[in-house]
Amino acid sequence: MLRSTLIGKHADHVDGFRWRSREVTRIEGFSDAVFGFAITLLIVSLEVPRTSTELLATMRGFGSFVITFVILASLWYAQYLFFRRYGLEDRVTVLLNLALLFTVLFFVFPLKFLFGLLLGDPSLRKAKVMTPHGLEPVVLPEHRPIIFLIFGLGFAAVFIVFLLLYRHAWSQRDALGLNEFELAETKFAIRRVKLAMFVGATYCVMAANQLLEQSKANQRAAEVLDFIVLAVFLGIMVMMGKLIRERRMRKRDWLSRLPEISDPPEDPSPS
C-alpha cells in the first residue's frame, strides 16, 4: 500500500527528491527500536570500571565503539531516507525491512570485535588475552579466515537487502510517479549499494587468502590474491568517486531547474 495522500506533484521537495512520507509508521517505529537495541548491545557489553586501570582499559575500546556506532547510524539514516522518499508499506517492503533488521543485529558484535582488534592489531596476529591457562592469542590463526568470512558475508548481506529495497521501489516507479531526477537518484542508489556489496565480497576473498597463507605451498597464490584484492578495492573507490561526481552535477542541474518545474508559468487566457 502507498500513502497516496503524500504522493504527487505537490509533495515537498527535500534535497531535490519529493518525500512521500513524513509520518513515523509502525514499520519505522519498530526499526528505530531495533537500531536502538543494536547500539545498546555495544554499550551493555562494557562493564562499569572499578579502578582507574580498568577505566583506561575500557577507553581503549572507545575507537571501535565510535566506528561501529557511525556505521549503524549510517545504515539507520539510509533506511530512514528510503522510507521518506518512497513511502512504501507493502508486504515486500515489510519483509525486506525485517531482513535488514535481522542482518543488522547479527552484524553488531562481529563488527565491533573486528574493528576493536584492527585498531590495536591490524594483522590480527599479535593481540593476546590473559586466560586461566596463561596468555593466549585473541584470534587463533585458524579462526582468522572465519572472522573475515563472517564480516564479509554480514557486510554484503546488509547491502543486498538495500539493493532489493531499491529494486522494489524501481518496480513501483509508475505508481510512485517518480520524475526524471528521482529515477536517476534511484538508479544511483542501486549502483552505489552494488559497489558496497563488492566490498563485502572482497572480505570473503580475504578469508580465502588467509587459508592460502596458512599453507606454505600456496604462499605465491596468496600474494597474487592480495594484489587482486587491493586492485578491486581501488577500482571500487574510483567507481564510487565517479558516481558521486556525476550525481552532484545532475543534482546541481536539477535544483537549478526545480523552481520553474515546481511552479510552471500559467498560460495567459483571453479575458
Image (cartoon, grey):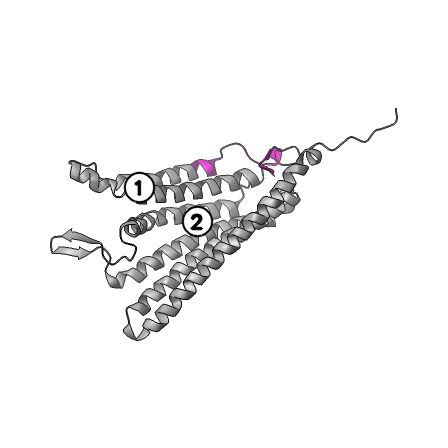
Q: Quadrant of residue 205?
A: bottom left
| 123 in relation to 265, above or below | below
Residue that appears at 39% across and 53% down:
154
Q: Residue furthest right?
A: 270
State which tag comes first along the sequence, 2 or 1: 1
Report the span colored magenta.
1-30
Specify whether residue 130 is in view: yes
Residue kind at label 2, given as amino acid type: Ala
Residue that appears at 63% across and 44% down:
181
Residue that appears at 31% across and 57% down:
147
Q: Residue furthest top?
A: 271
Determine whether, in the image, residue 86 is placed left or right of residue 269.
Answer: left
Which mark, residue 41? 1
Camera-nearest residue between 28 and 85: 85
Q: Quadrant of residue 145?
A: bottom left
Residue kind at label 1, given as amino acid type: Leu
Answer few, some or many: residues within 10 Å of disc 2's Cα (few below 14, many 20 plus, some between 14 and 19).
Answer: some
Determine the secondary structure under disc 1: helix
Q: Which residue is mark 2?
A: 99
Specify whether residue 46 is in view: no
The C terminus sits in image quarter: top right
How many numbered circles does the render carry? 2
